[in-house]
Image (spheres, helix red, strand yellow):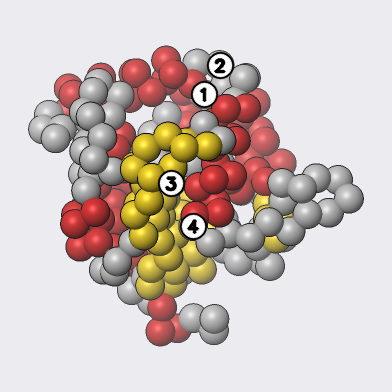
Amino acid sequence: MITTNTAWEEAQNWEQWWHSNCINSLNEEIKQLVYADKMGLARTPDNKTPYRFDLQNKKILDIGGGAYSLLLKCANIGEGSTVVDPLMDRHPEWVRMRYKELGVEALAMTGEDVNFEGFDEVWIYNVLEHVYDPEKIAENARRAGKVVRVFEWIDTVQNIGHPQVLTEEKLNKWFGGEGKVEQLSSMGCFGKAWHGVFKGDSYASSSD
């Protein structure tokens, strides 16, 4: 487990190296389609693309969405939708311009510093292995939204880019429910995954 700020900075530097100039993102975005499916996001194809998600004006907070958030594949995005990522200001300017064009706010911020409320949904996918305090991020996500959708890899091997090792037991506790565990081996996704859809702290106010 990560225990120092220095180790966290090293993990962020590795992550920046991994994404580099953010240009050839196909592999990462193919994997995102798996994450989306496992988080219960149904595609709504149109005559332009099969890779489209209709959000029906829901306000979304994507924690750790990085340079190519799933929001970039969405239509009818609710006003105030936001993606936060600690590396956002290190990415090329065109990355932030895409979010601006979409009407999505892109903030250079850690998930541990998120102090928002009022979102219809919060998305977290392939993020918590990379952070300083995953339990704090889960707490912030539950406070921020009515519904929290999560996909994470579990029982992995710790390394410089993935300082946290997540388990089913920890994630169930942090998100207040039982996620589904399965072994994946397709579309670039190989390993043991945990995913689910959970009630946020303000779920009672939801019209869903």
**Mark closer to the chain start, 3 or 1:** 1
Q: Amino acid at mark 3?
A: Tyr
What's the distance in space between the residues labelled 2 and 3, CA to CA? 21 Å
Tell me if mark 4 has few (under 14), some (14-19) or many (20+) residues whose alpha carbon lies within 10 angstroms of its own: many
> Looking at the rendering, which quadrant does residue 60 occupy?
bottom right
Q: Nearer the viewer, residue 158 or 182?
A: 182
Q: Residue at x 78, y 54 (%)?
A: 45
Q: Are marks 4 and 3 in contact (CB under 8 Å)?
A: yes
Identified by mark 1, the residue type is: His
Which residue is farthest left?
3
Which residue appears at 68% of the width and 52% of the height? Answer: 74
| 4 or 3: tag closer to the N-terminus | 4
Residue furthest out toward the right: 47
Q: Where residue 29 sits in the image (x, y, percent)?
A: 59, 35
Label 2: which secondary element? loop
- Secondary structure at numbered mark 4: loop
Name the residue that disc number 4 marks.
39
Q: Is residue 204 left or right of residue 52?
A: left
Q: Judge left or right: residue 150 versus residue 164.
A: right
76 lies above or below 67:
below
Which of labels 1 and 4 is toward the front?
4
Tell me if residue 9 can be seen. no
First in residue order: circle 1 vs circle 2: 2
Label 3 sits on a secondary structure element that is strand
- Calculate the distance from the C-alpha at mark 1 to the C-alpha at mark 4: 26 Å
Mark 1 and 2 residues: CB-CB less than 8 Å, in contact?
no
Viewer-side label of 1, 2? 2
- How many dots with numbers? 4
First along the sequence among labels 2 and 3:
2
Label ID, residue 21: 2
